[in-house]
Image: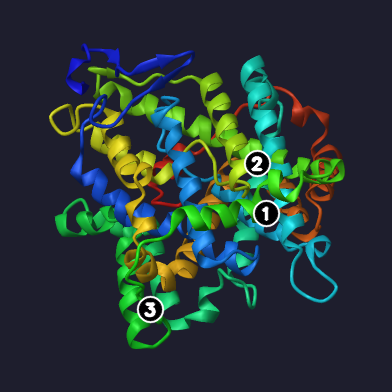
Amino acid sequence: MSSSRQHGDVHPGAKWGPFTLRIPFIHTRFSLPDYLQGVAVAGATGLALVPVFTHIMGLSFEEAVVMATIHSLLISLSWFAFGDPYAPGWLTPAVPFVIAFLTLPAFRLAEGGFDHIAQFQAMTAMTLNFSAILIFLGVTGLGAKLVKYVPNVLKGGIILGAALAAFMRVTEPGDASNVFEQAPIAGTLGVFICMLLAFSKPLQQKMVHMKWLAVLVGLGLLPGFIVAGFTGYFTHEFTYNIRWEILDVPTHAASLWGKVSPFAIGWPSVDMFLTALPLALITYVLFFGDLVTGDELIEEAQPKRPDEKLDINSTRAHIATGIRNVIMAITAPFFSTQGVMWTGIQVILLKRWGLGREKVDSFFDSISSFYALFFLVPLLFIFLPLVTLLQPLLPLALAITLILTGFSCAMLALSLVKDATERGVMVVIAISLCVFQLPWVGMLVGLITVFALLGPSAFVNQKVELDFAHTKREGSDES
């Protein structure tokens, strides 16, 4: 049980190889505040890609919900089956690149619409590429050595490119995430409130003296969703059609398998694997940045809890994330939904953990309550009255996810460079990644620009330098 941990030890669980299985109620305790946050915040965010699955990739609403459920179940394996001390989530900065990739002319049919089989095959190729990179670099220990030679200006250009792609995506006419077009009043108000609570410096200063404001800010995205939901109802921008039924999971899971699994639709071609490789490499840089950020957050919080040691292991994180991506690639392929950390939630859970053992016995109590009771038994996704209540808000959830991610990425990217020339190079890289349809072309332009304007020395003795002050001030910018 949770209380059996000795002072200063790693929290107990069932060891298997380099991993640790921790079962809720057996190895962890229930934490009500963390559970309520999981239901409120992770619910809408976990379903945020449903509009993409339905509008761009051709799934029915029910199939899209099953697909989101599978993604959420796999995300929970990070702490449940593998024992990573991170609040897991999407590789959110890569989402805009992935959506842009799926809408390339290569996936459009002559008679209109998209070739959905090719789209899902491409997602399988991209995910298996990423899995191979993670597992190889994790097992060999080459991951850290490789990324330290990637110039900070190139990292910044990739991250800034993700920010620009996110902003372009949510403002593109007719896009599933363009809530400003679909619900201009409610959508704008919801996005504004979420941005205000996540990034406003005046609010951060006032909440120290105003407890009610601190509680409001602590609710993360929830206030913005509530205000937007009520506003949209009265402005008739959101229509609520509640379905009083339970999702028929076996039926829709079977139809989903027939539409997306490579065992049903065929495996990607070699050309697809090659075309998808650059985006997988770009995403690895984002993954590594999340991993470094997570380790730094844990190391800063650790002195506050000498009773529990959080075991940081880069090799385990690489392999565990790689395995989750392999499973996802053959069951519900959509690249970038299996990352190592959800930064905003990691910060929130570590803050609560840092209050002492009397508040929460173990960090894994918080993670298991936030994810397990909601995701490993995904009642919200199966209970259609609640899902259909959230359905009109899904474009808003996707837009907020992309906008907050874009803003956070822009802040982080600008903190990685140190002079005007590097900032200029970073902008060129970012624009290249957004303008050129194929990711490898944008990367090639970026590499040439770095060599031409900064010289080969830019690739020597690079260090991963992330602005953790910014990261720790961010709200729920990653899903």
* Residue at 78% from the left image edge and 60% from the top image edge: 435
Residue 193 visible: yes
Which residue lies at the image location 64% right of the left edge and 44% below the top edge?
A: 156
Which dot, 3 or 1, sits closer to the camera? Answer: 3
The image position of residue 33, as x and y in percent, is 21, 46
Q: Which numbered disc, 3 or 2, marks the residue closer to the eye? A: 3
Q: Disc 2 to disc 1, how far (Cα)?
A: 9 Å
Task: Tell me, for residue 241, which label it has, or none.
Answer: 3
Q: Which residue is mark 1?
A: 97
- Indicate the amino acid at tag 3: Asn
Q: Residues within 10 Å of mark 1 (few under 14, many from 20)?
A: many
Q: Earlier in the sequence, mark 3 or mark 1?
A: 1
Left or right: 415, with 19 as reference point = right
Dot placed on the residue nearer the N-terminal end, 2 or 1: 1
Q: Which residue is mark 2?
A: 283
Query: Which image quarter: residue 24?
Result: top left
Q: Amino acid at mark 2?
A: Thr
- Residues at marks 2 and 1 touching, judged by CB atoms closer than 8 Å: yes
> Looking at the picture, how far across and down is residue 349, in whole percent?
30, 39
